[in-house]
Amino acid sequence: MSQSQWQWETATAGAVAGFATVAAMYPLDIVRTRFQVNDGRVSNFPTYKNTAHAIFTITRLEGLKGLYAGFLPAVLGSTVSWGLYFFFYGRAKQRYSKNREEKLSSGLHLASAAEAGALVSLCTNPIWLIKTRLQLQNPLNQNRRYAGIYDALRTILREEGWTALYKGLGPGLLMQVSHGAIQFTTYEELRRVMVDYKAKKQKSETASNLLNSFDYAVLGGSSKIAAILITYPFQVIRTRTQQRPTDEGIPRYMNSWHVVKETARFEGLRGFYKGITPNLLKNVPASSITFIVYENVLKLLRPTRKND
């Protein structure tokens, strides 16, 4: 069993998990993004009372298509991100571990997750920016609409230059590194506790067979809640920074620090948590789906590897 083969197995499992997650929970992603940028001081976004009202309003004004705006870059971004994340995370853990049987400390799990998060953020920021721009297109927006992911990319490069593709990279890096580190460290530690607890009752079973899909769902959901609550402000800052400029080329916010100052001044702490409800509704079950798919895809690949 080679290290490279193991790394590609984790990358494949992560990619499949990412796709399943996005497909299942995408309408809530639209709602979250629109809540995040609505600071109450602009008129180019509809006013939503709550998550249910937002879904109803988007469906009524834009049709079901509105609930899946930006779906292609979202699928691409999530699939690539999860694939790269598990790949980089697995490589980092292997590098920090002398052998695969040795348990890593919490600090090394943290370092592995942080390293993976930073690399993923650098690779995928342009995809997330395009997804955000497509999600924010609505009947009240006066800009010429992007026809799709390719038209968005071409228009951004023509009107704003290639550096625009990396708007929001700063808060994105902070969010990705800290969020992933918190989530995966929490997941690994809770998984270790659960495995140790169940191992006392079923001494003959291996770790991979001790936990079932429900256990992975609980682990994934719990670790996701901890990560969301701590890192959510970074996500709001990134989304607001990535908004499309006006037809005159004037950006809504000049940079991330401008977002922080304006949000704190006009909205207070609450402004940094706009959209938290649809975000939790989306990400907690989504994280459970991700880890269920990830662990089960790995189980499917392992027998194949053993037979080679």
Image (cartoon, rainbow, N blue to C red):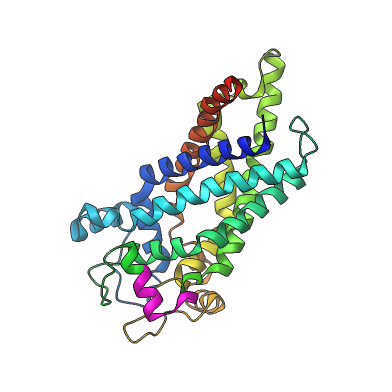
> Which quarter of the figure has residue 205?
top right
Residue found at the very far front of the displayed protein: 308
Residue found at the very far bottom of the displayed protein: 248
Q: Is residue 199 visible?
A: yes
Q: Residue at x 51, y 75 (%)?
A: 259
Q: Is residue 188 above or below residue 28?
A: above
Give the residues drawn in magenta, as a range.
Answer: 153-163
Residue 66 in magenta stretch: no
Magenta stretch: dominant SS? helix
Q: Is residue 209 above or below residue 106?
A: above
Q: Is residue 257 above or below residue 177?
A: below
In-image side of 131 versus 226 (left or right): left
Q: Which quarter shows the N terminus?
A: top right
The one of 257 and 80 positioned closer to us in this rendering: 80
In-image side of 280 versus 195 (left or right): left
> Which quarter of the figure has residue 204?
top right
